[in-house]
Image (cartoon, rainbow, N blue to C red):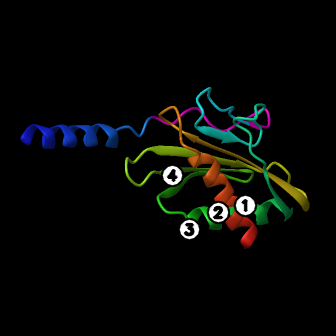
Amino acid sequence: MRQKVLAVLLFTTFLAGCAGSAPRLGITNGELSPCPITPNCVNTQASTDVDSIQPILFTGTQAEAKERLLTVLKQMKRTQITQEREDYIRAETISAIFRFVDDVEFYFPSRESGKIIIHARSASRLGISDVGVNKKRIESIREQFNAN
């Protein structure tokens, strides 16, 4: 019995340390980083159907879109904004049970009033499959963003 408890504790400690290091992220030539070959990422600028998701659309200014998006992200549990620029936001979301880290990015290049296209990328740092978590996250953010 004692060995089983010890094994569970060691396994849990191992998983807690599996946050992974942050991959190279950001904007390159007007695009978010592509998704890896593993099915644990979505990207509005993806070229494959597996990784693709629709961008978030907004009518207004870039500054208004950014402020609304920041409001949504700040209300999300276990989410920390790690980088913020005029046209880019990056956040880290930590899973509740195993403490895995997912990177979430938003890029909104237009500075003019009118239609703003917000590109999004959400990806797990570790693992192969995310069981659709990243897609659900972006869809939830879209829903909350449009509700404001």
Regarding mark 1 in the picture, which secondary structure is present there? helix
Horizontal side of 85 relative to 91 (left or right) equals right
Q: CA distance from mark 1 to mark 3?
A: 14 Å
Characterize the local packing of mark 1: few (<14), some (14-19) or many (20 or more) Cα atoms within 10 angstroms: many
Decide: few, some or many residues near mark 2? Use Cα within 10 Å; few <14, some 14-19, many ≥20.
Answer: some
Mark 4 or mark 2, which is nearer the start of the sequence? 2
Say what amino acid the circle numbered 1 marks.
Answer: Lys
Crowd around label 3: few <14 · some 14–19 · many ≥20 (10 Å): few
Q: Are marks 2 and 3 in contact (CB under 8 Å)?
A: no
Marks 2 and 4, how far apart at CA: 14 Å
Q: Is residue 35 left or right of residue 130?
A: right
Query: Can residue 67 be seen here?
Result: no
Task: Judge whether residue 6 is colored magenta.
Answer: no
Check whether the beta carbons of the residues at disc 2 and disc 1 lie within 8 A of each other.
Answer: yes
The mark nearer the N terminus, 1 or 4, is 1
Whole-Å distance between the Cαs marked 2 and 1?
Answer: 6 Å
Label drawn at residue 75: 3
Which residue range is magenta in the image?
Answer: 21-31
| Residue tagged 4 | 93
Per the model, the C-alpha gap separating discs 2 and 3 is: 9 Å
Q: Comparing marks 2 and 3, which lies closer to the viewer?
A: 3
Element type at mark 2: helix
> Given contact means CB atoms under 8 Å apart, are the residues at marks 2 and 4 in contact?
no
Q: Are marks 1 and 4 in contact (CB under 8 Å)?
A: no
Query: In terms of image quadrants, where is residue 29?
Result: top right
Calculate the distance from the C-alpha at mark 4 to the C-alpha at mark 3.
Answer: 12 Å
In the image, 101 versus 134, the foreground residue is 134
User: Which quadrant of the rendered structure holds the N terminus?
Assistant: top left
* Residue behind mark 2: 70
Provide residue 141's location: percent of width, then percent of height: 66, 60
Report the amino acid beneath label 3: Gln
Mark 4: give few (<14), some (14-19) or many (20+) Cα within 10 Å: many
